[in-house]
Amino acid sequence: MSHDAEKVKRIIAFKQKLEKRVEDLQSELKELQATLEAVNAILLEKGFKRAEIAKESAEAETWPPKEEPIAEPSAMRAPTEHENVIPLIAVSGELLAILYIDEDSLQVLPAEDKSFDVNSPPFTSFLVERVLGKMQEKDNELAKAGQIPPEKIFSYAITREGDIIREITIRNVDEERLRELKSSIRWTLEKMYEKMKSQS
């Protein structure tokens, strides 16, 4: 191959990299714009507030049961210094939930106007059993093998009012799992929302 041909080949490869980067940035920009719109909508919508679940309410349960009490779902609140706030938005543009991410923990608050039922597929079959349960199971095995300390085991709790999900609290989340969790939770809630719409 001549020197010129090799040079053209390198330029073409570089052009393809640039095109891929532009495509990635455009996709990221769209996602950021959608997130910004959702955050603006939340700020404008003063009605988007979570009423606190009464401590004495017999209906409020934490599932699965935990030895340590899990904090009640908090009202929509200002994030603390270390938190990131990420709206989970359906393809249709509907706000599904808000994620509060703080160091190694994750809190999911469903949108006020969505009543996600724990019995609605694919919540238990996919999110609980195949995602959350598997992560916890893997960490339990690592802890038994002495590879991670017991206090670093992945854990989760689902706080509900009757069958309605009020909050999902997840602890000991690393960056890799965070990406998977964001994707899995959004997909699950979107499927549940589609089912809710089809039944209404």
Image: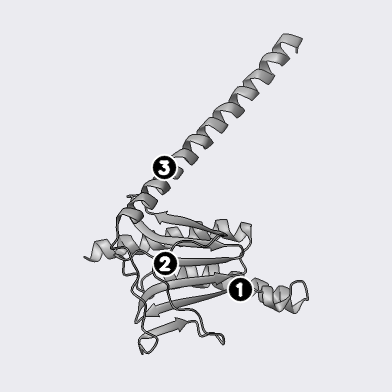
Name the residue carrying label 1.
136
91 relative to 168 in the view: left or right = left
Is label 3 in a helix, a strand or a loop? helix
Residue 189 in view in this figure? yes
Q: Nearer the viewer, mark 1 or mark 2?
A: 2
Figure check: 16 above or below 164: above
Q: Amino acid at mark 3?
A: Gln
| Residue under the point 35% across and 56% down | 95
Q: Amino acid at mark 2?
A: Leu
Disc 3 crowd rating (10 Å Cα; few below 14, some 14-19, many 20+) is few
Whole-number angstrom distance, CA of label 2 to CA of label 3: 21 Å
Query: Which of the two residues, 144 or 95, is positioned nearer the viewer here?
Result: 95
Figure quadrant of the N terminus: top right
| Residue under the point 41% across and 46% down | 36
Disc 1 crowd rating (10 Å Cα; few below 14, some 14-19, many 20+) is some
Q: Are marks 1 and 2 in contact (CB under 8 Å)?
A: no
> Where does residue 79 sit, x and y in percent of width and height?
48, 61
Name the residue carrying label 3.
33
Figure check: 56 above or below 128: below
| Residue under the point 62% across and 57% down | 176
Picture quadrant of residue 162: bottom left
Name the residue carrying label 2.
109
Whole-number angstrom distance, CA of label 1 to CA of label 2: 21 Å
Q: Residue furthest left?
A: 200
| Residue under the point 61% across and 29% down | 17
> Where does residue 195 sit, x and y in percent of width and height?
30, 64
Residue 2 in view in this figure? no
> Where does residue 173 sit, x and y in percent of width and height?
61, 65
Specify which label sits upstream in the sequence, 1 or 2. 2
Picture quadrant of residue 189: bottom left
